[in-house]
Image (tube, grey):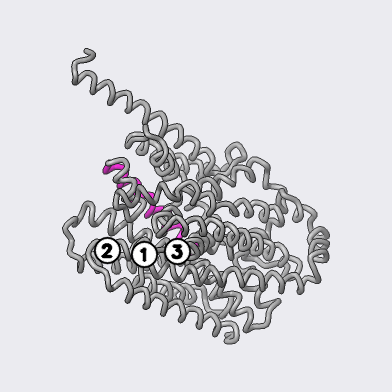
Amino acid sequence: MNWEVIIPLLVFLVIIFFIGIWSSRKGAKVSGGDFLQDYFLGGRELGGFVLAMTMVATYGSASSFLGGPGTAYTMGFGWVLLAMSQVVTGYFVLMILGKKFAIMARRYQALTLVDFLKARYNSGPVVILSAAAIIIFLFSAMAAQWIGGARLVESLTGMSYHTALFIFAVSVLVYVTIGGFRAVAVTDAVQGAVMVVGTFILLAGVILAGGGVTNIINDLVSENPNLVTPFGADGNLGKAYVSSFWILVGVGVVGLPQIAVRSMSYKSSKSLHRALIIGTVVTGVIMLNMHLIGVFARPILPGIDVGDKVIPLISMEVLPAWLAGIVLAAPMAAIMSTVDSLLILVSSTVVKDVYLNYIKPDASIKAIKRASFGVTAVLGIIVYILALDPPDLLIFLNLFAFGGLEAAFIWPIVLGLYWKYANKYGAIASMITGIGSYIAIHFYNEANGNLFGVHTVTLPVLLSLVAFIVFSLIMKQEAYNYERIRKGEIA
């Protein structure tokens, strides 16, 4: 083992652990309904910097720091261009949700996204569909992060994949289970700062090792001219696919529960406005730097078989061992920050939206705390089992989860906030249409190539919008007619 690389990472993990302990002690001072608000929403006390960083760190995951650069290594500058469509993500989410979502969430006393949907639509089926979508698709997303963390530890230490997976899983589970959302948000702020610094150091190291940007570009052109075009190494990034990809990583991100819930958690409008600026700048820096590193690494380390290993391998190639250990805390931070956020989201769905709504509404505070800690730990163990047999490129597992969540939630959230005619029938139809069509088109595309050349999420998002509007208006008219019949105005 290369202890010069491993020791800085171990120090990083210890720091994160103690932040979890501190958060646990702060959270231990609250009780009753305040415990749920603190454990699952951080007491709605996030400032601008922490809000921005927790959004960036939650969104910037193993895909951004391992899978994305690995795909850029394979496809070239076309994937860098695709990745940059994510720059406006945080700004877009906070502008669309922002104040209105936070105000309505406080009015409804909602602690989770499902809480909000339950209060807005007053419908049991909406709650069940929402909880099912979150649990099913976020298991895929969490598995992708577990895999990314394990591959990082595997690349650094030479351990077997399964041993590395076990070490990573235990590290994350301890501080998330103990600290809850507050630990997640505060550690995200630390991890976000590590990400930014790490990307600059590694990009500089790669450029120097490659003999400068001009030399690297010439090497890429010599190998395959398509690597420096927008269309990918094999020319398979068509205009329709590239354009529609923005729905997945731009517009559709509003529908991601792990991102949307952060719009409930800030303490003031000033915090929101500061987060808009900080989040956009930090996202741009991270996405550009990491994906450029992936492409630039190709001439320096040709022939890497598993794309997800590009970042750890190039770090150890171009940096001194001790500095590589510090820099590789960035992808570790990205992975851990996304894992913890997804874990706490799925835990809140099970505890708050299923257990307290339908199983034991009168549960004692002690029972709620025990259920919260226990469910979080059990979920982590289940994801660990799912991650034992990983795919070659985890980015596509992560994007599958993103698309499914967006197809399910984007219109019930957005139209629920901004359209007065939105009702439970439209929400139910939209969620069923979105989830059903997304899964069907995903498997069709796997077998036959992308339908109409666009990304899988495009048609489900459009179909779910049509279903929402049509069913909301039809049932609005039916309800109106029923009321008139009841009053004797019509036969």
In space, the residues marked 1 and 3 are separated at their CA atoms by: 11 Å
Tally of numbered tags: 3
- Residue 275: give x, y in percent of width and height: 51, 59
- Residue 101: give x, y in percent of width and height: 40, 48
- Residue 79: give x, y in percent of width and height: 66, 54
In space, the residues marked 2 and 1 are separated at their CA atoms by: 10 Å
Kind of residue at disc 1: Gly
Q: Residues in magenta?
A: 123-145
Within 10 Å of disc 3 (Cα), the crowding (few <14, some 14-19, many 20+) is some
Marking on residue 47: 3
Residue located 54% across and 47% down the image: 248
Residue, disc 2: 34
SS assignment at label 2: helix
Q: Quadrant of residue 26?
A: bottom left
Q: Quadrant of residue 202?
A: bottom right
Residue located 59% across and 62% down the image: 282
Residue, disc 1: 42
| Label 1 or label 3, whichever comes before in sequence order | 1
The answer, for residue 391, to whether it is visible in the render is: no
Kind of residue at disc 3: Gly
SS assignment at label 1: helix
Kind of residue at disc 2: Asp
